[in-house]
Amino acid sequence: MGAHIGYRDLPGFGRRFIDYDPQELAAEVTYQLGALEALARSAGTRIRYVKPHGGMYNTIVHHKDQAHAVIDAIGEYDETLPVLLLPGGYALDYARRQGLRGVSEAFADRAYNPDGTLVSRREPGAVIEDTGRVVENMLRLAQDGVMIAHDGTRIEAGAESICTHGDTAGAAQMAATLRAALEDAGVQIRSFVDV
């Protein structure tokens, strides 16, 4: 079970930027982790990793004050929790410098900009619904360590985890097809939590 922490943005599904005061953002992260931990314990389990969501995830790639607030709050809560973050982003580097296990993550169903960030969902083609293209992209990443940006730019990228979004059309079948293709190609699939 992972904590998918995010901005308090119900109308925007947490996918919009919010200009938080860093102390308020840190408190929000701590609150969300604590609330989920209580629910997890009541179900006989616990939080095993953290992944920022949407607007927060994309903002802390480059916004140092928010990255510090989010990463420091996670570390103060439980420094043993792995944190999924975008490769090449400030937050991943900062998490690792703070002694947290930063797990680099790729998005199977999202288009990339040449700088390795995700294309905004407001742009056409930001979400990839073509399972064949998803499989091709993730096989290239797993085998060659390369992603292709929407403009054809090659991005050197390593990833320990692959995300498909549950609200992408056909997500469950896409994930199953992708997993089978990776296994057929000899890619070993395992949990980053157990590493």
Image (spheres, rainbow, N blue to C red):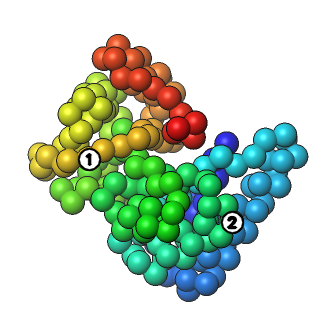
| Quarter occupied by residue 31 | bottom right
Residue 89 point in image, percent of width and height: 34, 63
Residue at 38% x, 55% y is: 86
Residue 145 point in image, percent of width and height: 24, 39
Whether residue 41 is visible, yes or no, is: yes
Residue linked to disc 1: 157
Inter-mark Cα distance, 1 to 2: 29 Å
Residue linked to disc 2: 77
Tell which circle, 1 or 2, labels the residue nearer the N-terminal end: 2
Residue 132 point in image, percent of width and height: 29, 25
Secondary structure at badge 1 equals: loop
Residue at 41% x, 78% y is: 64
Q: Is residue 115 left or right of residue 28?
A: left
In this rendering, the answer to whether 56 lies above or below 151 is below
Residue 23 point in image, percent of width and height: 61, 84
The type of residue carrying mark 2 is: Tyr
Whether residue 11 is visible, yes or no, is: no
Name of the residue lying farthest toward the right: 42
